[in-house]
Every structure is written in C-alpha cells, then in structure tokens.
Image: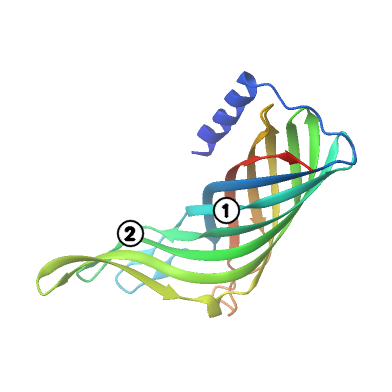
Amino acid sequence: MKKILMMAIVAMMVTTKASAQYEPGTWSIQPKIGIGFSQISNMENIDMGTAKLDNQVTYAASSGVEFEYQVSKMIGVAAGLSYGVQGTGWKDFQQGVEKMKNPRVELEYIQVPILANVYVTKGLALKAGVQFGFLVDSNVKMTYDSKIMERDATMDASIEMKNDFNKFDLSIPVGVSYEFNSHWVLDARYHIGLTKLNKETLSNGKDWKNGMFLMSVGYKFDL
C-alpha cells in the first residue's frame, strides 16, 4: 500500500506544474485531512487463554490546520493543531463460541506538530520536526459474532482504557510534501513515537510506542 501511495505522488508530480515559490516573510494557512496506518510496538502476543493475538496495523486519521511562516525562499517553519485517531490492531480470533472481528486499540489525540520545511525545488518540500500529542480518549473496540437464544447475533463492543495510557505522547514526524499550482498540497509523513504509552511497567520490560504513516491533502491560503 505504501508503494502504491508513493507511486501516486510521483505520477502527480510529473503531470502537474508546481506552485510559485513563497516570498520570505509571508504567512500561509492550510486546512487539511489525512488517512493512513498506525501500529503500537510491543503489543504483540497478547494471551487471551484460547488465543494469542498477533499485533498488526490499523487505520489512522487526522484533520486540522497548519500555519507556515516563510523564513527564506528555501526554509519554512510550520505549526499546526489537529485531532487524530491512531492505535493498533490484532488478527480476528475465536474465543469459545464467539468470533472476535477487527479487534483494535483506538487512541484519540489533540496533536500539535511543529516542523521545518526545506523546499528543494518549487512546490517540493522535505520536512521534519516534533509533534506533541495530548490523549483525549482510549478504547479497545471489536465486533463479535455470538448466539443469543440460539440465534446468530453480531454486536459491537468498546472498553474504555483511558486510565491505562499516559496522557502525553511525543513523536518525530518526517516526510515530504508537494504543492500544485492550484494550491492543493499532498503530504506524506511517518511519525516515530518516542514516549512510552503504558502507565504500568510490563512484565517483558518493553514499552508500548506509537508509529504512524499518514497521507494528507490540504489547501494552502496566503495570509
């Protein structure tokens, strides 16, 4: 999937002209929305008695706004505010007569990214920085098939786990963006989690950490 997304970026870059370069000392604002994949490291092999769960990726999503100040023709500094959902998933598993589908942890954050954008050519920027995340909610969710009064039933389950996770998350986003002449911006970032998510010390001595790949699209306005 990542290869397909990167091929799409390259194709759009080839077929579309880049935007004009922003002048030093100018400001811009960019509303944006994104989707991608996320995973929490070291949450694999959870023992459910009748099944051991293998950790895998789940979806991620984000929406928000970024402001950018153009320091020079080559360098811009951006800061944003967004609401994001990320987490991790496990494979479907059977527990007794019940089949658990799409089990996952969903972490909801208010996110504050601060990045340096290096414009290597018109419209094309390499970026890196830090992102501060503030936990809003945390849940384990799944859909399960069961039998009620000898009839098949499908139900959604959600277990609140906000008190099991630390309230603050720090990550390093690195990526690339491309702005077209219509002011649309395509942005791809990978977020490397630095802080541990679990409050309690784990028996294996390993800490849970976030990891996320996010592809977003935004529209850039001059201020």
Q: In this view, does 216 lie to the left or right of 125?
A: left
Instruction: Indicate the amino acid at tag 1.
Output: Ser
Instruction: Indicate the amino acid at tag 2.
Output: Asp
Instruction: Name the residue located 72 percent from the left edge and 40 percent from the top edge.
Output: 221
| Secondary structure beneath label 2 | loop
Q: Where, quadrant-wise, is the C terminus in this rendering?
A: top right
- Residue ID for mark 1: 62
Relative vertical location of residue 105 with respect to residue 215 in this rendering, above or below: below
Q: Who is closer to the viewer here, 155 or 82?
A: 82
Q: Residues within 10 Å of mark 2 (few under 14, many from 20)?
A: some
| Secondary structure beneath label 1 | strand
Residue 188 lies, in percent from the top left, at 63, 41
* N-terminal label among 1 and 2: 1
Instruction: Name the residue located 59 percent from the left edge and 52 percent from the top edge.
Output: 63
Q: Residues within 10 Å of mark 1 (few under 14, many from 20)?
A: many
Q: Who is closer to the viewer here, 60 or 80?
A: 80
Which quarter of the figure has residue 24? top right
Residue 132 lies, in percent from the top left, at 71, 62
Relative vertical location of residue 23 with respect to residue 150 in this rendering, above or below: above
- Residue ID for mark 2: 92
Q: Do the residues labelled 1 and 2 touch (CB within 8 Å)?
A: no
Residue 75 at least partly seen: yes
Instruction: Name the residue located 82 percent from the left edge and 33 percent from the top edge.
Output: 22
Residue 12 numbered tag: none
Q: Who is closer to the viewer here, 83 or 115?
A: 83
Which quarter of the figure has residue 83? bottom right
Residue 131 lies, in percent from the top left, at 71, 58
Residue 174 lies, in percent from the top left, at 70, 46
